[in-house]
Amino acid sequence: MPGQLMDIRGLDPISWWPPAPGWWISTLLLLLTLFLLSLLLRYLLRYPPGSWRWEARAELRDLWRQRNKRPQKESAARLSELLRRIAIARFGRERIASLSGPTWLQWLQQSDPNGFDWSGLGGSLLKLPYAPESHNMDPGELDALISAAIDLVAHSYEGSFIGKIVHLGSSRV
């Protein structure tokens, strides 16, 4: 009888592939976290809190949300003021303060990396704030001007130190 006894056979070794579902979930969570952190870093590099970009973006987004609730004359005047403040923040008061009228629009067009037609479509920014209350512009034109200003702020990092470190591509606000 002792000759008929067989040794106890051990368990098969555990395979390392494929991993258990917990490892798959952990890996996906890690990748998602890294992706979200990269988006946050991208956002903070583009719009550092407290910078003119941060404030300009916030004001332009507010203007975009309120564009149909405010009179067009008020929205155009506010956009014109914001564009002037953005230009002064980017290029300095000495260079910008003397620009007015068509010269201002021409400078905007030359300085806009997106190539928006400020000279053609931006004329309303010069006329509408001083026009009678009854005078309005096409709502699509105001939307295009606000959108172009948002894009101008979004792409203003190019040529800066941050723009040289991280090329973020183009994206909507």
Image: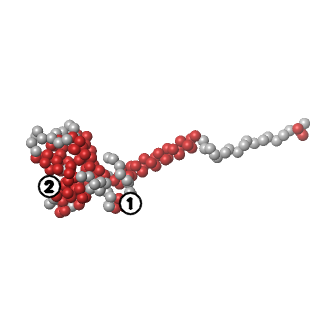
Query: Is the residue marked by circle 2 packed among few (<14), some (14-19), or many (20+) residues within 10 Å?
Result: few
Helix, strand or loop status at disc 1: helix
Q: CA distance from mark 2 to mark 1?
A: 36 Å
Q: Position of residue 102 (x, y in %)?
A: 16, 55
Label 2, on which residue? 101
Label 1, on which residue? 165
Left or right position of 19 against 90:
right
Q: Residue at x 49, y 44 (%)?
A: 29
Q: Residue at x 22, y 52 (%)?
A: 118
Q: Residue at x 26, y 56 (%)?
A: 112
Instruction: Identify which residue, 53 or 69, lies in the foreground.
Output: 69
- Quadrant in the picture for residue 113: bottom left
Question: As shown in the figure, which amino acid type bears the numbered disc 1?
Answer: Ile
User: Which residue is farthest front?
Assistant: 120
Q: Is residue 53 visible?
A: no
Q: Position of residue 20 (x, y in %)?
A: 60, 41
Left or right position of 120 against 172:
left
Q: Residue at x 20, y 51 (%)?
A: 120
Query: Is the residue marked by circle 1 packed among few (<14), some (14-19), or many (20+) residues within 10 Å?
Result: few
